[in-house]
Image (cartoon, rainbow, N blue to C red):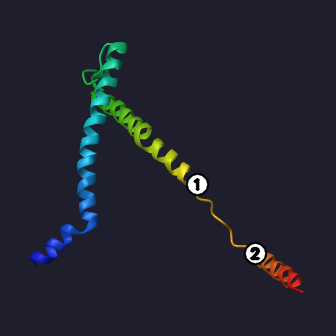
Amino acid sequence: MLKGFKDFIMRGNVVDLAVAVVIGTAFGAVVKAFVDVIMDLIGKIGGQPNFSAWVPGGVHVGAFITAVISFLIIAAAVYFMVVAPMNALAARRARGVEETEAPSEEVVLLTEIRDALRVR
């Protein structure tokens, strides 16, 4: 029973997942700090970075607006800091590897005929 648990824990994908969670948590802290900076800049422009106190007509929509703005900033940060560079790296790697098509049956037949004529 303990051997099975040890094998499960030592399996590569469990260790990879643990590393991903740790890195994700650390990256989440960086992104949250970046969002705080952006929200402070919004506060400097608009006077208040947190819209939670905004209650138009008695409806508490300010917290929702703050959450939406935070989400958009987080999504932009993740896109421009992770996704775009990874896509560029994948495109650069793909340029280095050219896929070759298999020749059609006609081309193979014509090549065989040409080679046979050369031998004569």
Name the residue tied to disc 2.
104
Residue drawn 28% across the image and 33% down it: 32
Q: Residue furthest front?
A: 119
Q: Quadrant of the N terminus?
A: bottom left
Q: Position of residue 61 (x, y in %)?
A: 30, 28
Q: Residue at x 44, y 44 (%)?
A: 83
Residue 96, which numbered label?
A: 1
Q: How far across and down, in percent of the image, does residue 80 sit?
A: 44, 37
User: Quick one: SS at disc 2?
Assistant: loop
* Mark 2–mark 1 distance (CA, rounded to whole Å): 25 Å
Earlier along the polypeptide chain: callout 2 or callout 1?
Answer: 1
* Left or right: 7 in relation to 60: left
Q: SS for tag 1? A: helix
Few, some or many residues within 10 Å of mark 2 (<14, 14–19, 20+)? few
| Nearest the eye: 53 or 104 | 104
Residue at position x 15%, y 77% in the image: 4
Residue 14 locus on image (x, y percent): 24, 63
Q: Quadrant of the C terminus?
A: bottom right
Q: Which mark is residue 31?
A: none
| Type of the residue with mark 2 | Ser
Quarter of the view holding residue 63: top left
The structure residue drawn at horizontal position 75% and vertical position 75%, both measured from the top left corner, is 104
Q: Is residue 96 left or right of residue 28?
A: right
Residue 61 in view (yes/no): no
Q: Residues within 10 Å of mark 1 (few under 14, many from 20)?
A: few
Q: Quadrant of residue 103?
A: bottom right
Height in image: 17 above or below 106? above
Residue 86, x across and y down, in percent: 46, 47
Q: Compared with residue 42, is residue 19 higher up or lower down, i.e. above or below?
A: below
Q: In the shown orientation, is residue 14 left or right of residue 111?
A: left
